[in-house]
Amino acid sequence: MNRLGFLFATGLCGIAGTALAQDVFIAGLAPSVRPAGAPVITQMHKDAAWYARALTGVTEPFPASLRFLEDQGAWFTPFTHPGMPAPYDIRGWHSGDGPTPGKTGQ
């Protein structure tokens, strides 16, 4: 492709991209304002299975520091997901059977 053809094609792509972008919703322009009609989570149902997953590898009596789980909403928390594998997996997420009480790592 010659230089003039390349410049012409680049210009057309730029114009077309600008025209298309004006009709598309772009998130992040006003992060403190929710768009009208955006879905809203009104409640988070936490059943026994949710608490069992959240408390994986934690033995009773549960420490008072875990009371935050009572207020946990539907937002992401790394506490309810597996993290790094052994030797850092002190809660036993990757071993499948949970850690040995009083023992960390392997």
Image: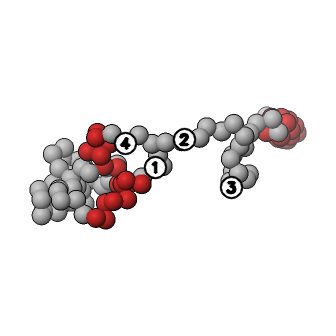
Q: Residue at x 30, y 55 (%)?
A: 84
Dot 4 amino acid type: Lys
Can you see residue 17? no
**Quarter of the figure with residue 40:** top right
Tag 2 secondary structure: loop
Q: Residues within 10 Å of mark 2 (few under 14, many from 20)?
A: few
Give the mark nearer the N terminus: 2 vs 4. Answer: 2
**Quarter of the figure with residue 46:** top left
Q: Nearer the viewer, residue 29 or 16?
A: 29
Q: Residues within 10 Å of mark 1 (few under 14, many from 20)?
A: some
Dot 2 amino acid type: Ile
Q: Residues within 10 Å of mark 4 (few under 14, many from 20)?
A: few
Give residue 73's mark. Answer: 1
Give the mark nearer the N terminus: 3 vs 2. Answer: 3
- Using the numbered discs, state the Cα–Cα distance from disc 2 to disc 1 in whole angstroms: 9 Å
Give the mark nearer the N terminus: 3 vs 1. Answer: 3
Mark 4 and mark 3 residues within 8 Å of each other at the beta carbon: no
Q: Which residue is the site of mark 3?
A: 32
Mark 2 and mark 1 residues within 8 Å of each other at the beta carbon: yes
State the quadrant of the N terminus: top right
- Using the numbered discs, state the Cα–Cα distance from disc 2 to disc 4 in whole angstroms: 14 Å
Give the mark nearer the N terminus: 4 vs 1. Answer: 4
Q: Residue at x 79, y 39 (%)?
A: 21
